[in-house]
Every structure is written in structure tokens, then in C-alpha cells.
Amino acid sequence: MTDAIPEYRIQHRDVIVIGASAGGLQPLQQVLEDLPVDLPAALFVVLHMGATSRLVDILGRTAALPVLAAKSGLPIEPGRIYVAVPGLHLLLHDQHILLRRGPRENLARPAIDPLFRSAACTFGGRVIGVVLSGALNDGTAGLLAIKRCGGMAVVQQPDDAADPSMPLSALAHVDIDHVAPTAALGGLLARLTRERAGETPLIPLETRLETAIAAQELPGMETDEQLGEVSRFTCPECGGALWEIDDSSLLRYRCHVGHAFTADAVLHAQTNRAEEMLWTLMRSHQERAALARRMAQQERLLSRDALAEDLLERARGYDEDAEVIRRLLRDHTGVVGTWNREQDVR
């Protein structure tokens, strides 16, 4: 018989969800190390990761509580740390864990927002959401959902974060309850779990719908029409139309198959795509120049000098085009590559 969290217990905040990305591993380790061994809460962790991850082993070396890889159907128990696994969203449903290969959010799976929303839907005012260091703004929409459902929002102090983008975004869009440096977060969370939980209001329809999409329970265009208005933009993942979601001051989008993005993530993806196109175009021009020169050599061997000169002139034109593109890439000041640099948990 497991010591599962009672379904109707609302006296204390006994569910902690933590999201981190670039630069988030060290503060996450510190927070988990600083928690007391008798913490009366269950913790759930999403850290952006690649196709493989040793995060459970890494965190388990120093964490004060047992660290487990999340498994679908696993009952939720206090005093345990459940860690998302590669390729699957970590969701909470009733008194157990649910893993689903739902649509990626902000180009990530597992992503932070689906965990936060599912916790808000399931546990309402008992939830504490924590955003640590990370690029762009994953976690902000999830914190908004937690607050709307009566939960509490905590962020790492931005000047204490290796990448302050996620904490800064949360502070800009969410009514944050606590801001603390890494060294104080463990003690703060321990204290908050012993406070009485907030009231759980009626869970907003939008939050329930987006949680269902992540769980692969609500596909289709009709759902998205309830979430927002059709925009002029297309999904960076599948090319479908994006619906613009009115989420407080946070500009968000979701496509008809469920891929979800903040506006920053859409811009990031478009920047990536533009740079990839430029590299492809430059390579194409360079290859055309090389081929034209090879053809000119062949024409000279056949004593067709006029054709050879024409081909060399074309090669020079391709070289000039490639140089223009090379300068564009050299002077590029976008954020291309940020996402790849986040995939540092191996």
C-alpha cells in the first residue's frame, strides 16, 4: 500500500513542480540538496534535454530525497522527486503520473508548461510552481495557469541565474509570490509546503483544454478555435495555421495539431529557419561556382575557349552571390543556436 497524496487533502501545498533550461542544472541540484528529508510534498522536475539523459543519476547523487524517473501510472507519493524522461511530456492526473508524446511546446518535449498546467488542473491551490534559469520563456504560461488555479509562483532571482531569460519572463507576466537566489530556494520551498494551501477556484476551460491537448486527448481544429483567433503566422513545426491565444500579457500561439509557442519561441524558430536557408543558399552558390569552373576546364580541353570564358564569368557571379550571403551570416545578431546549447544534459 503506497503512501499516496490523499485526493481531497487541501490543507498544505504538497505538490512542487520545477522547470529549468539553459544553466538550470546547478541551481536544480542545489535546491534538491537543500530540501529536508521529511519534506511533506512530492516534487516533479522538467529540465530541457536531448534524446538521452542521465539527469536522474546526476540529481540522485546529491538530492536529499529519492529521485525517480517518471513512469506512466506511477502513484504520486510525498517525499519523492519525479524527473521527466526524454521525448515525453510529464503530466499529473488524479493521483498518478501520466507520460504522453503530445505536441511539443516551445520546441521542447518534455516541456515545462504542460507539467505546470496539469498540476494546476489536478491539484489547484496545493501547487507551488518554480522557474529556474533558462533561455526564452518556457514556464511563464504554466506559472500563469498555476496562479489562476490558486497555486503559488516562485522564481530564481534573475541576477543569480546563468541565463535569466525564463525568470525575467515570469516576473514580467506573472504575479510572482517569491523571488529568491539558489541558496535560499530549498529552505523557502520547505517552509511553503507547511503553509495552508490556497483556495482552488473553478479551473479555467482554456487550462483544461491545453492540458488535454498535451495528454493527446483533444486533437482537432475545433479545440484550437476555442483557445484564440487565427493569426497570419504559420507553425514552425508543421506549417499549419497558428491560433493566437490571449493569455494575459503573454503572447502565445498554438497550431491545429497542438504545437504551442510563445511569441519569442516562434521568432526564435523563424530565425533558425532563416539562417538554415541562408547556409543552404550559400552552399548552393559555392557548388554552382565550383561546377562552372570544372565545366570551363573541360571546355578548354576541347578548345572551346568562348564557352570556357562564359562559364568562368558565371562562376564569378555565383562567387559574388555567395559572398553577399556570407556577409549576412557573419553580421547576423539573432539568437540562433540557443536551443541547441540548452541540450547539455547527457
Image (cartoon, helix red, strand yellow):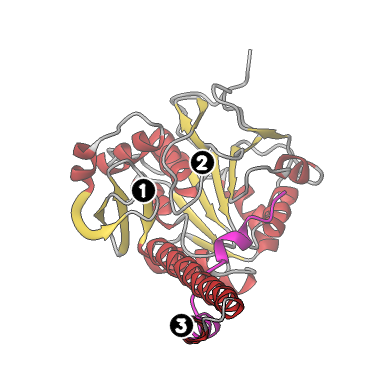
Judge whether 162 appears above or below 330 on screen.
Answer: above
Judge whether 339 appears above or below 296 on screen.
Answer: above
315 on left or right of 237: right
Residue 316 visible (yes or no): no
Residue 285 in percent (x, y) is at: 49, 74
Viewer-proximal residue among 137 and 328: 328
Would you identify the image quadrant in which residue 156 lies?
bottom right
The span shown in magenta is 321-346
Q: Quadrant of the N terminus?
A: top right
253 on left or right of 42: left
Secondary element type, mark 2: loop
Residue 250 visible (yes or no): yes
Q: Identify residue for label 2.
A: 13
Does 236 appear in magenta? no
Which numbered mark, 2 or 1, is in the foreground of this view?
A: 1
Q: Identify residue for label 1.
A: 238
Disc 1 residue type (three-letter): Cys
Disc 2 residue type (three-letter): Arg
Which residue is depicted at the point 51% across and 44% down?
A: 109
The total number of labels drawn is 3
Judge whether 198 appears above or below 123 on screen.
Answer: below
Residue 212 in percent (x, y) is at: 35, 34
Residue 71 in percent (x, y) is at: 60, 27
Upstream in the sequence, badge 3 or badge 2? 2
Which residue is depicted at the point 75% across and 49% down?
A: 33
